[in-house]
Image: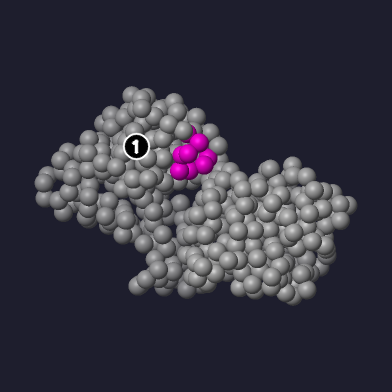
Amino acid sequence: MQVKNICCIGAGYVGGPTMAVIAQKCPDIDVTVVDINEQRISQWNASDLDTLPIYEPGLKEVVSQARGRNLFFSTDVDAAIAAADMIFISVNTPTKTYGKGKNMAADLKFVELCARQIARVATSDKIVVEKSTLPVRTAQAIKSVLSETGNGVEFQILSNPEFLAEGTAISDLLRPDRILIGGETSEKGEEAIQALVDVYARWVPKENILTTNVWSSELSKLVANAFLAQRVSSINAISELCEATGADVREVSKAIGMDSRIGPKFLQASVGFGGSCFQKDILNLVYIAKTFGLAEVADYWEQVILMNDHQKSRFATKILETLYNTVSGKKIAILGWAFKKDTNDTRESAAIYVADELLEERASIAVYDPKVKEERVFADLNYLESRSAEENKELVEVQNDPYEACKDAHAVAILTEWDEFKSYDWQAIYDNMLKPACVFDGRAILDRAQLEKIGFKYYCIGN
């Protein structure tokens, strides 16, 4: 089967960039990204590419090449489904906040709604591709919904998990370590797998395209994120031991990272990991283990989350203790609100939780992030429901200028590793802060010796 028309349901962090690259690399395939969020679609269609709803280096260049040629963004979901040969499901799968599996299992209501809409609209055979991060055996649930149409339409379900890192999503898509495609081991299943292989093979070496059964593909995504998060929590656990013993976690990290069996990636001690994937996927893995009665397996992986939460809380406590055990009425400047650099995504960002603990101590918070807007900062804090929206407005200000955010502050907390923070005039920042002026570097990106020479009291994770 040769794919001529692709539809992607969901114009978010995965769907938008992935489909933009597919459209760029496959100019003979029409790619339509649909979403019921009219504002988001308007942003994708805006003439000013700087207003795209997602910030990723290189994204606007890819969109500009393909949009209007064979890349389209629309709210007409039914029309896109009807016209497509292949349909990607790329909707949100948040952790459940209710019922069985609360706070662990993935909430699949949006995936099921997509499947039901596809079943209602489709009049020709379709290949349906899971692109959202989903628990094992979700493909079977999708197939069950689609098989009940009774209109003679046949569906093949594929699992094609994403392995993108926000901030490097476009380069990850253009030069992926691997593309993973899972499908049925039947004749038609193999044909569907090959159809998707042929799409990616336009620019990805075939040896980097792996095919498996559906269940292996679904589980591989969860396990990959769990392993990466485990490394972060492992080095963060060691960072606390380093502080207690006088060791330097950066020296320890470099030493063990030079072991070829271990490698240096994801061994940077920090205030903790964030983002939409790591915590959600580990909790999903924990829930699956518990469902199968594997209590020890569940406990093992749950400890990765507990360590991550502890690290964020420990960082906030360090600020409190250093400022004489009270931050009430004191101004703390937070530089960085996104969960990592080169993205405007704030989901599960460490900054949210550090700020929340400081606000509970009645600190005044000034936030600066080069890509995160004011309304997003307040939405994140209000979602926690620790205080009313009015209280958050009283205690928090969002600045467009980092120097203004730091003015008259008792301390600066670095919570995102934006490169621009390294180039600031820290002497000017110090001169306009209250003394003693403190820097709490939760991402270990600043030069300690330089800051201490200026006069700062410098504190960093692990030393």
**Left or right placement of residue 381 versus residue 260 in this view:** left
Q: Point out residue 64 in the picture as x, y percentages from the top left corner.
A: 45, 28
| Residue 184 appears in the rendering | no
Q: Amino acid at mark 1?
A: Phe
Q: Is residue 339 above or below residue 98?
A: above
Question: Is 258 placed left or right of 100 in the picture?
Answer: right
Q: Quadrant of residue 83?
A: top left
Residue drawn at (68%, 43%) of the image? 419
Residue 276: x and y in percent read 49, 55
Q: Secondary structure at mark 1?
A: strand
Residue 337 percent location from the top left of the image: 59, 54
Q: Position of residue 379 (x, y in %)?
A: 49, 59
The residue closer to the viewer here, 3 or 338, is 338
Instruction: Say if residue 98 shows up in the picture.
Output: yes
**At 28% across and 56% down in the image, what residue appears?**
112
Q: Which residues are magenta?
A: 49-56
Q: Nearer the viewer, residue 300 or 74?
A: 74
- Residue drawn at x 68%, y 58% is 333
- The image quarter containing residue 16 is top left
Q: Give whichever of 52, 214 is nearer the camera.
A: 52
